[in-house]
Amino acid sequence: MFIVAFNLTDELKTAVDEAKRRYEEATSKLDIDYIMYDKFGKDLIKRNKLSPDSFMQLAFQVCC
């Protein structure tokens, strides 16, 4: 395991703190939900030689 030490100026520390604050502000408004679907799984996707990414994109479009 490597340990990296950063020497940050006060200006960079302030910028990091501001980025954290903006991130928290933006993500606090998010609401995440999910559906458990157990009728099929990755075997169906593999057996039909589908791209997992394209499969998920289609699933998002159908659900939402």
Image (spheres, grey):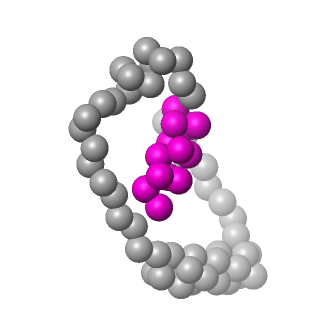
The reply, left or right, for residue 64 in relation to residue 37 is right
Give left or right: position of 19 versus 31.
Answer: right
Residue placed most toward the observer, 19 or 29? 29
Residue, x 48% and y 82% (percent of image)?
A: 29
- Quick check: 47 above or below 4? above
| Residue drawn at the location 30% of the way across and 30% of the way down | 40
Q: Is the magenta stretch mostly helix, strand or loop?
A: helix
The answer to whether residue 29 shows anywhere in this view is yes
- Span highlighted in magenta in the image: 52-64
Task: Please state which of residues 44 and 31 is positioned toward the viewer in this rendering.
Answer: 44
Expressed as whole percent of the image width and height from the top left, the position of residue 60 reads 49, 52
Q: Where is residue 26 in the image (x, y as percent from the top left)?
A: 56, 80
Inspect this view and state whether residue 17 appears.
no
Q: Position of residue 48 (x, y in %)?
A: 48, 18
Q: Which image quadrant for residue 47?
A: top left
Give 33 or 29, whichever is nearer the viewer.
Answer: 33
